[in-house]
């Protein structure tokens, strides 16, 4: 069973929330972050390289020092203030008329080490190391990770009680997504939430595998370096926003490839016919896959539907049934010679939030030669894979909307 606890969040006063809140560090490059960051934006803390002219290496010592300086300055100026008591928080997001309601809690690092916080992706050590540095130098979880949990009616009822009142923060960001935030400060409700989660068997990492792994590693490091360790220290916990499974929506995560591995467009189409039913869809509108095992392809100015033939996949295998597995095995590897999605520089990945028009744009520009759109993975598939101990192929899931950083920060001491 998982452990959660409330915490005294460091967060912006109500009048500053929209200015402080920022998109996550990993969805913006440095130039984009510099252009987007207002005076109070958390981007000055999560991407401090933007405060230099010209922009410096985000992994350099001056950038790390600037991150610490800015976090301290934001608190000194009153743009970030710590709550007086441990609380839970409701963080809701609205996208295209649909709202999902999460709880901001602290999860235990041991639950990650023991497999009660279940992952579905492999992590890269270099990215873990980078996130570890940020947690270590700030002595805080500046940005939350994003978990899901099995639906629970009693938690829903507690959340609904607070959502019925006035929100602490309530704003629509520049991308059109709504962000709403309430404070759960009633001790009886806090205790009950803690008790309910003690009966929930697992959390599932939706977004933030590297931040989760980094937080767990920092906790272990602090434990090892503290001869007076008791287990009650704040560094044993890290901040996450947890959402009920049924409220989350995974959108497509698509692929673009730089070249056709020596094939002409017509040769690629003929080769695809061995494993797929190929149907030309024309040039006018992007074609979106409508079901599992159907793909769309943009090639040479035209859209195509590719439907995997029977016998080319195994619906009884939690990994083999995934469309990313089918595409990787039968197209990217077999025909285009891409063996390792993590390291091959000929392939790039496009989150579905950018739309299918982004795929055709990158091919039409000559930057890429071919694009593939996939039908989204379901939450059930993600949970089944995590429960079985399997790992999804790289770049399988894209969750939207992304959590805004800066609405709550967890100090480790």
Image (tube, helix red, strand yellow):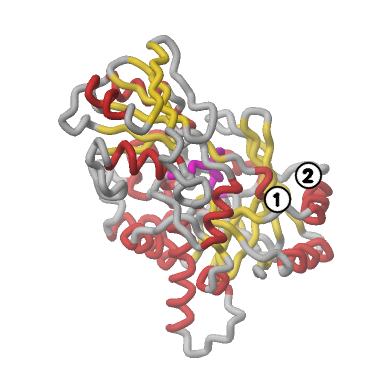
Q: Residue at x 59, y 49 (%)?
A: 407
The numbered disc on residue 90 is 1
Mark sitting earlier along the chain (2/1)? 1
Q: What is the crowding at mark 2: few (fewer than 14 residues within 10 Å), some, or many (at least 20)?
A: some
- For mark 2, give the secondary structure: helix
Vertical placement of residue 188 versus 348, above or below: below
Taking 340 as reference, is 228 left or right? Answer: right
- Quarter placement of the C terminus: bottom right
- Whether residue 85 is visible to the viewer of this picture, yes or no, is no
Q: Along the line of sight, which residue is nearer the eye, 331 or 43?
A: 331
Q: Along the line of sight, which residue is nearer the eye, 284 or 158?
A: 284
Q: Which residues are magenta?
A: 396-406
Q: Residue at x 57, y 60 (%)?
A: 387
Q: How many numbered tags mark residues here? A: 2
Expressed as whole percent of the image width and height from the top left, the position of residue 37 reads 44, 38
Taking 124 as reference, is 240 left or right? Answer: right
- For mark 1, give the secondary structure: strand
Per the image, the residue denoted by label 2 is: 163
The numbered disc on residue 230 is none
Q: Is residue 400 magenta?
A: yes
Q: What is the crowding at mark 1: few (fewer than 14 residues within 10 Å), some, or many (at least 20)?
A: many
Expressed as whole percent of the image width and height from the top left, the position of residue 310 reads 46, 36
Q: Which residue of the protein is positioned furthest toward the left in this rendering?
A: 262
Taking 280 as reference, is 93 left or right? Answer: right
- Whether residue 359 is visible to the viewer of this picture, yes or no, is yes
Expressed as whole percent of the image width and height from the top left, the position of residue 300 reads 28, 17
Magenta residues, dominant SS class: loop
Query: Is the Cβ of the residue at disc 2 closer than 8 Å to that at disc 1?
Result: yes
């Amino acid at each position: 069973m998982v452990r959660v606890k409330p915490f005294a969040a460091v967060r912006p006063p109500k009048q500053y929330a929209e200015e402080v809140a920022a998109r996550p560090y990993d969805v913006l490059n440095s130039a984009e972050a510099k252009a987007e960051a207002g005076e109070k934006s958390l981007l000055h803390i999560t991407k401090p390289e933007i405060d230099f002219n010209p922009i410096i290496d985000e992994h350099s010592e001056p950038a790390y020092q600037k991150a610490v300086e800015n976090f301290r300055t934001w608190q000194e100026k009153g743009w970030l203030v710590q709550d007086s008591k441990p609380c839970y928080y409701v963080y809701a997001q609205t996208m295209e008329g649909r709202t999902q309601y999460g709880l901001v809690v602290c999860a235990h690092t041991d639950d990650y080490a023991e497999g009660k916080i279940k992952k579905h992706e492999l992590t890269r050590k270099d990215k873990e190391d980078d996130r570890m540095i940020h947690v270590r130098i700030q002595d805080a979880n500046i940005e939350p990770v994003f978990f899901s949990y099995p639906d629970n009616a009693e938690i829903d009822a507690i959340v609904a009680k607070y959502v019925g009142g006035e929100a602490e923060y309530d704003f629509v960001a520049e991308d059109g997504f709504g962000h709403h935030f309430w404070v759960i400060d009633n001790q009886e409700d806090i205790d009950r939430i803690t008790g309910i989660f003690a009966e929930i068997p697992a959390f599932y990492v939706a977004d933030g595998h590297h931040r989760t792994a980094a937080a767990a590693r920092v906790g272990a490091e602090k434990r090892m370096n503290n001869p007076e360790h008791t287990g009650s220290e704040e560094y044993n916990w890290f901040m996450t926003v947890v959402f009920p499974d049924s409220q989350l929506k995974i959108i497509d995560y698509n692929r673009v490839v730089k070249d056709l591995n020596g094939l002409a467009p017509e040769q690629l189409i003929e080769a695809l016919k061995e494993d797929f039913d190929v149907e030309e869809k024309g040039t006018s509108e992007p074609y979106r896959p409508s079901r599992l095992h159907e793909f769309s392809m943009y090639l040479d100015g035209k859209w195509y539907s590719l439907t995997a033939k029977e016998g080319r996949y195994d619906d009884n295998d939690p990994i083999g049934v995934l469309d990313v597995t089918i595409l990787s095995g039968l197209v990217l590897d077999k025909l285009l010679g891409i063996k390792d999605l993590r390291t091959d520089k000929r392939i790039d990945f496009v989150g579905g939030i950018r739309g299918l028009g982004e795929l055709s744009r990158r091919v039409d520009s000559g930057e890429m030669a071919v694009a593939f759109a996939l039908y989204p993975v379901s939450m059930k598939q993600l949970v089944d894979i995590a429960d079985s101990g399997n790992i999804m192929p790289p770049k399988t899931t894209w969750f939207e909307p992304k959590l805004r950083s800066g609405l709550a920060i967890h100090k480790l001491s």
